[in-house]
Image: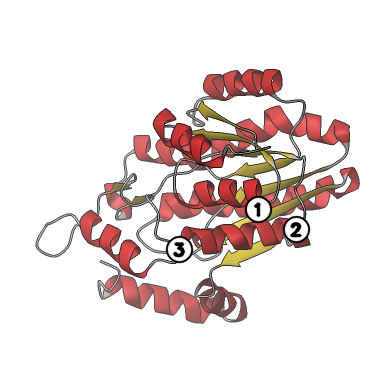
């Protein structure tokens, strides 16, 4: 594992789940931290946990879906820290529905929170990283950015875009000694379902949100496992990092036989096995 001693790391969406674990692990590896979340109390609590002898962390409440809020964070960060060495773009939201249920406002919400939130941060922070000619960027996409999953089309659209963005930046930024990795988590025990918009109903007309949240809680991997894979991807300069192990077989199936994967996905959806 790379040494992040005396490096400054930004972790967005650090109030819970994978972001919180990324912050914890980077702190243990010696990084100074600037952590953000939509909810100030979440990151304030994390700062109290992380700040110890020789440790430094600051919390910021940021709505990464709004450019003006990200610009304010950029100004605040620039006042508090000299530069950013590690940029973990983790903030995001979840949503699930049948395609005919989505409204244009839902598409705008998911794309602003998952895609534009990353674009805003890159637009503001990347020039400084290019100027200093060094850095590491970790973009948290999703397993749904590697395989198309029925019932979450807008979510997949946002996450596929992040994978493509990460691959493009990885090639383009190498000459500046900036490494880019894309973390693609599968089913993880986080708040993404509880905090997200789930419109799908079961055959009785009841919302499945509670059932899906319970499934993620019972069977989802621990966020610290995924964060560890993310840090490892940064340390070893890996481009695409599926995580945890259950993501690998389905991703490999999609790569080896896209037609077979599509047939399985269609069958699972039509039989109602996802809901």
* Local crowd size for mark 1, using a 10 Å CA cut-off: few (<14), some (14–19), many (≥20): some
Q: Is residue 104 visible?
A: yes
**Residue 222, which numbered label?**
3
Mark 2–mark 1 CB contact (< 8 Å): no
Mark 3–mark 1 CB contact (< 8 Å): no
Q: Disc 2 vs disc 1: which is toward the camera?
A: 2
Q: Is residue 165 visible?
A: no
Q: Quadrant of the N terminus?
A: bottom right
Residue nearest the observer in this picture, 2 or 97: 2
Vertically, is 144 above or below 14? Answer: below
Q: Secondary structure at mark 3?
A: loop
Residue at label 1? 164
Q: Quadrant of the C terminus?
A: bottom left
Residue at label 2? 235
* Local crowd size for mark 3, using a 10 Å CA cut-off: few (<14), some (14–19), many (≥20): some
Task: Give x and y (percent) for residue 216.
Answer: 34, 63
Residue nearest the observer in this picture, 244 or 175: 244
Mark 3–mark 2 CB contact (< 8 Å): no
Q: Going from the N terminus, do you reach mark 2 or mark 1 first? A: 1
């Amino acid at each position: 594992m790379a040494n992040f001693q005396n490096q400054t790391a930004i972790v967005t969406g650090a109030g819970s789940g994978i972001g919180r674990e990324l912050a914890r692990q980077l702190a243990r590896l010696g990084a100074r931290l600037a952590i953000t979340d939509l909810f100030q109390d979440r990151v304030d609590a994390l700062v109290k946990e992380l700040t110890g002898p020789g440790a430094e962390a600051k919390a910021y409440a940021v709505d990464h879906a709004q450019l003006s809020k990200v610009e304010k964070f950029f100004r605040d960060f620039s006042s508090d820290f000299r530069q950013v060495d590690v940029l973990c773009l983790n903030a995001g939201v979840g949503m699930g529905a049948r395609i005919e249920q989505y409204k244009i406002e839902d598409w705008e919400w998911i794309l602003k929170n998952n895609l534009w939130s990353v674009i805003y941060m890159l637009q503001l922070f990347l020039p400084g990283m290019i100027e200093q000619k060094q850095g590491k960027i970790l973009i948290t996409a999703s397993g749904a950015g590697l395989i198309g999953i029925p019932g979450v089309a807008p979510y997949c659209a946002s996450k596929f875009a992040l994978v493509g963005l990460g691959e493009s930046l990885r090639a383009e930024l190498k000459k500046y000694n900036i490494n880019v990795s894309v973390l693609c988590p599968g089913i993880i025990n986080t708040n993404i379902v509880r905090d997200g918009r789930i419109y799908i109903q079961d055959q009785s007309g009841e919302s499945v949100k509670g059932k899906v949240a319970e499934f993620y809680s019972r069977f989802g991997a621990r966020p610290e496992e995924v964060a560890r894979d993310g840090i490892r991807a940064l340390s070893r300069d890996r481009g695409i990092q599926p995580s945890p192990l259950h993501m690998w077989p389905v991703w490999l199936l999609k790569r080896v036989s896209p037609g077979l994967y599509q047939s399985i996905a269609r069958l699972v959806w039509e039989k109602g096995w996802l809901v």
